[in-house]
Image (cartoon, rainbow, N blue to C red):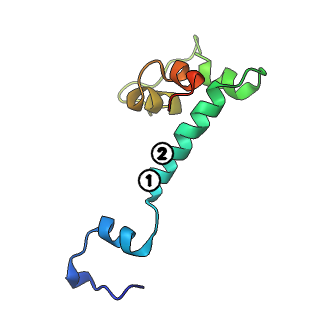
Amino acid sequence: MVGVRRTDRISNEQMRQMTKVKDAVELADKSKKRWAGHLARRTDGRWTLAVTEWLPLDIKRPLGRPATRWRDQLRQEIGRNWMCLARAGDD
């Protein structure tokens, strides 16, 4: 595509700069945070906000290392009060 061989030992970051291709992981992370902000600012009572805030009292997560939830990842990256920050407009 740009005439670079594997033996040239060019980093992925340099290749992205040369080809103007965006990093898929960064793009997905940015989209997830944008959606979280949109979701937190909703006030019309849609099910998406209710499902995000819902805590099942009668269902336990499996023993061991349970799979992380979408909300758990946001708490880890942004902080425990991610929803308040998103409502205020801070990303």
8 up-or-down from 76: above or below: below
Q: Which mark is residue 67?
A: none
**Between marks 1 and 2, how big is the CA–CA gap?**
6 Å
10 Å neighbourhood of mark 1: few (<14), some, or many (≥20)? few
How many labels sit on residues? 2
Q: Residues within 10 Å of mark 2 (few under 14, many from 20)?
A: few
For image coordinates 46% across by 62% down, the residue present is 22
Q: Is residue 9 above or below residue 25?
A: below
Please give the name of the residue rendered at 34% of the width and 72% of the height, measured from the top-left corner. Answer: 15
Is 42 placed left or right of 21 in the picture? right
Q: Which mark is residue 25?
A: 1
* Amino acid marked by disc 2: Asp
Residue drawn at x 38%, y 68% is 16
Q: Which residue type carries mark 1?
A: Val
Q: Which mark is residue 29?
A: 2
From this viewpoint, which residue is outermost toward the front? 89
List the single residue furthest toward the bottom: 3
Q: Position of residue 78 (x, y in %)?
A: 42, 29
73 versus 82 height, above or below: below
